[in-house]
Image (tube, grey):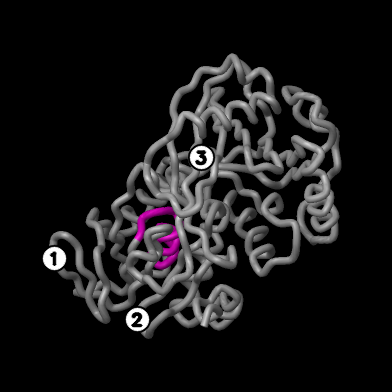
Amino acid sequence: MQTDYTIIGGGVIGLSIAYELLKKNFSVTIFNVTGPTTASLAAGGMLGGQNEFSEPSPLFDLAIESRAQHSVLATELDALTGIDVELIPSGLLKVATQPSDMPSLTQQYQFLTTQPATPVLWRKANEVEPLMSDLGQGIHITGDHQVKARQLTKALTKAVQLLGGTIIAEHVRKINTATLTTDNGHYHYQHLIVAAGAWSKQLVPQLPMYPVKGECMMLRVQRAPRTTIFAADGCYIVPKKNNEVLIGATSYPHQSDAGVTAGGIQSLLTRAIAMMPSLQHAQIIETWCGVRPQTIDELPIIGAISPHIYCCTGHYRNGILLSAITGKLVSEALIGDVNAQQRLAPFSPYRFI
């Protein structure tokens, strides 16, 4: 019997769509080969619903809604799979590490104060987070919490399997009108969803997107910060459980290799220690890199490219944040929900034509 929906991509976007479709009693097959650079396994896990925006965007309302859904999803996944996604209500402090960052930070604060979301506060940095050096003031976003990305991916994978989804660990090399080709043969599909992150373009070459490699590291500390710190220059410090701290991320557009560079790690440590001096005594546990899918207009690509092929990719560094709302809306849009289709319309691939 043919599967109702076939999904290429086993990161949080593809898994979230599969999870929602399975809850609606559709059959789902996922072709998934995750690797060391898969963005869902490499991400910092921040639910930056407000942190990521400094001007109006069609994504803003969806980001705020998705951020709220993660607490429900975490409870749901824990009950179903027994896996804790480690949702930590840390909040986030956005700071300027040099005077040239202040105009953009001020603009972002002014924008966020006009939006109907969690109130933001202009606070002295080391009063919000005592481990911070004296960097002056920053934006305290109390609602931007975080999860552990690997745990979320693991929980969604198990949930999909428990609900009857099929996961096939094979690389998809080519897609045609009714079949897809892997190293092991050909498979027929009824409805295909391409959600392969930065590798979606290899299957759908006309997608205007490119990979962005980013390096991260995990430290173990004696005393962990209580708040996520996000510098205006892109460096972030994310407190995890068990006195672990995740530091990220470098950014190399148009690169997708798995190599972690000495220069990249040095840059991250230099910037992180300048913000939080106690990190110089931390133990390095692990370093890695991930490859994010970026589009030319910095918005996701979500929508049909043919009667039977649907794309959902290009979430860049917001895949974890947007996974909850993406799974919900895409599953609804696929079965004909007009409201969901309208909400996703700004991200249609046809905007590039």
Where does residue 199 sit, x and y in percent of width and height?
Answer: 37, 59
Structural distance between the alpha carbons of marks 1 and 3: 35 Å
Please report whichever mark, 2 or 1, sits nearer to the chain's N-terminal start.
1
- To which residue does mark 1 refer? 185
* Foreground of the two, 186 or 76: 186
* Foreground of the two, 47 or 185: 185
Residue depicted at 53% across the width and 21% down the height: 220
* Foreground of the two, 163 or 102: 102
Where does residue 11 sit, x and y in percent of width and height?
Answer: 40, 53
* Foreground of the two, 57 or 338: 57
Q: Residue 148 carries which label?
A: 3
Quadrant placement of the N terminus: bottom left
Element type where label 3 sits in the image:
loop
Magenta stretch in the rendered image: 9-22
The residue positioned farthest toward the bottom in the image shown: 307
Where does residue 88 sit, x and y in percent of width and height?
Answer: 61, 38
In this view, the mark in front (1 or 3): 1
Element type where label 2 sits in the image:
loop
Q: Residue 330 carries which label?
A: none
Element type where label 1 sits in the image:
strand
Q: Is residue 169 shown above or below 57?
A: above
Residue type of the residue flagged with mark 2: His
Determine if the magenta segment contains residue 18. yes
Residue depicted at 55% across the width and 83% down the height: 338
Structural distance between the alpha carbons of marks 2 and 1: 20 Å
| Badge 2 density bin: few <14, some 14–19, many ≥20, Cα 10 Å | some
The residue positioned farthest toward the left in the image shown: 185
- To which residue does mark 2 refer? 308
Residue depicted at 75% across the width and 45% down the height: 141
Residue depicted at 51% across the width and 40% down the height: 148
Total numbered labels placed on residues in the image = 3
Left or right: 248 with respect to 10?
right
